[in-house]
Image (cartoon, helix red, strand yellow):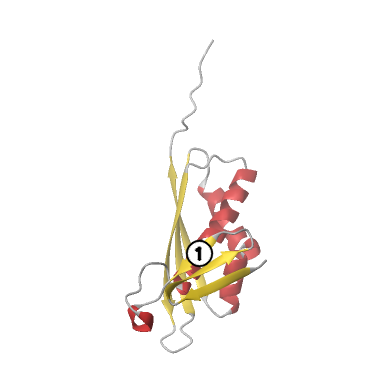
Amino acid sequence: MHTTVTFNRSLPLFGINDKGLKTYFDASSELLGPGGSAASPMDTVLESLGACSMMDIISILKKMRRELIFMEADLDAQRAKEHPKVFTAIQISYRLKSPDCTHADFEKAVRLSMDNYCSVAAMIRGAGCVITWSTELVAVKSDVTERSA
């Protein structure tokens, strides 16, 4: 895994990974001008936690042969008041729409992600941050209709 992050006279910074994909980073206006054209590095860490755990959850539920229509995670973080202003607590609220997933399946997938698979969660917890979560399952009817002969 490799990436290069570049500053070219002004913000935003941009990173390019070894696949050629670009990510932009900005900061508040006190650093180098107006700012706000891209997420901050800490925003992207928080977003990465959501994305990493959701990819695990999707994979786990697919292995359970569950149909997934929509999933969303809201992440709220608290940071230390002094530098380095690390995350001290993160609450994740997951919402899933599925016609056949049970709440127990959903909870199991989230727990497996958080306890075993999500490397971003492991790194953040390793820095002393407490991560908690809640789940909401919205049952929906499947779009598949059966026809009789």
Quadrant of the drawing holding the C terminus: top right
Outermost residue on the right side: it is 1
Identify the residue at image location x=60%, y=73%: 123
Is residue 51 visible in the rendered image? The answer is yes
Is residue 95 visible in the rendered image? The answer is no
Outermost residue on the top side: it is 149
Identify the residue at image location x=44%, y=84%: 80
Q: Is residue 102 above or below residue 26?
A: above
* Residue 83: percent from left, percent from top: 46, 88
* Residue 69: percent from left, percent from top: 48, 41
* Residue 107: percent from left, percent from top: 54, 54
Nearer to me, 139 or 55:
55
Quadrant of the drawing holding the N terminus: bottom right
Q: Label 1 amino acid?
A: Thr
Q: Is residue 141 above or below residue 86?
A: above
Question: Circle 1 sits on which residue?
Answer: 23
The local secondary structure at tag 1 comes to strand
Nearer to me, 90 or 36:
36
Nearer to me, 21 or 97:
21
Identify the residue at image location x=48%, y=24%: 145
Number of on-image labels = 1
Classify residue 6 as left or right of residue 112: left
Nearer to me, 82 or 143:
82
Label 1 CA crowd tier, 10 Å (few <14, some 14–19, many 20+): some
